[in-house]
Image: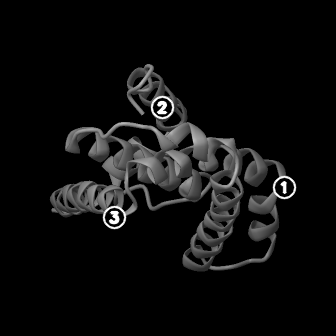
Amino acid sequence: MLFVKSLSLDILFILLFFFISFLYAVIVGKKRVIMIMVSSYFGIVIFQNLYINNFLLKQNLGISKFIFLKFSVFIGFVAILFFLLYRSILRKIFKNSKTISWWQLLLFGVLQIGLIISIVFSGVEINEKLFIIFQKIFISDNAKILWLILPVLTMAIFGKRGKY
């Protein structure tokens, strides 16, 4: 019975994940999604090298406060970097870009949200019996590597001259 409950929660989470990703990508738009993705990579480098994770772990916070603070700090870094990059040369690069199809927009949204979830939940202990699929998709070692590589590959594939 626990497995069925866990499986239904995982399926619900995956459906919600795709819905939120698509909604996010449509609201933000293609150019900003890609710029936020680039900002996320810079944010990951800064976030992981400032040892914020270790600092937050030493504060003896509950799991929900830990995840909320980690998410808030990471999104703060990404937001600051986005506004800095938006005023830089990247704005000129994306200025003359062409439109992309809805499925490409969905793909970029999924990769962006998946990358953020993977980074925020890395190092968090989750109950082994619940959210099995969530752990395999976002938190496992292989998943973390894939979430870091897939957005770059996707930008490279769709970033052929004149496509962005």
Point 15% across, 58% down: residue: 4
Q: Secondary structure at mark 3?
A: helix
Count of marks overlaid on the render: 3
Q: Residue 100 in the image: x percent, y percent? A: 29, 38
Q: Amino acid at mark 2?
A: Leu
Task: Indicate the quadrant containing the N terminus: top left, top right, bottom left or bottom right.
Answer: bottom left
Point 45% across, 48% down: residue: 31
Is the image coloured rainbow, by chain, by secondary structure, or in one colour? one colour
Q: Residue 44 in the image: x percent, y percent? A: 68, 48
Q: Secondary structure at mark 2?
A: helix
* Depth order, front residue of 62/4: 62
Q: Residue 51 in the image: x percent, y percent? A: 82, 56
Query: Label 1, label 3: how many angstroms apart (C-alpha)?
Result: 31 Å
Q: Amino acid at mark 3?
A: Ile
Mark 1 burial class by Cα count in 10 Å: few <14, some 14-19, many 20+: few
Q: Residue 53 in the image: x percent, y percent? A: 74, 60
- Identify residue for label 2: 146
Point 34% across, 55% down: residue: 25
In this rendering, is residue 163 above or below 135? above
- Identify residue for label 1: 50
In this rendering, is residue 5 above or below 42? below
Q: Is residue 126 left or right of residue 43?
A: left
Mark 3 burial class by Cα count in 10 Å: few <14, some 14-19, many 20+: few
Rendered image: mark on residue 27: 3
Q: Earlier in the sequence, mark 1 or mark 3?
A: 3
Q: Secondary structure at mark 1?
A: loop
Report the mark closest to the observer, 1 or 3.
Answer: 3
Query: Label 2, label 1: how many angstroms apart (C-alpha)?
Result: 23 Å
* Depth order, front residue of 101/135: 101
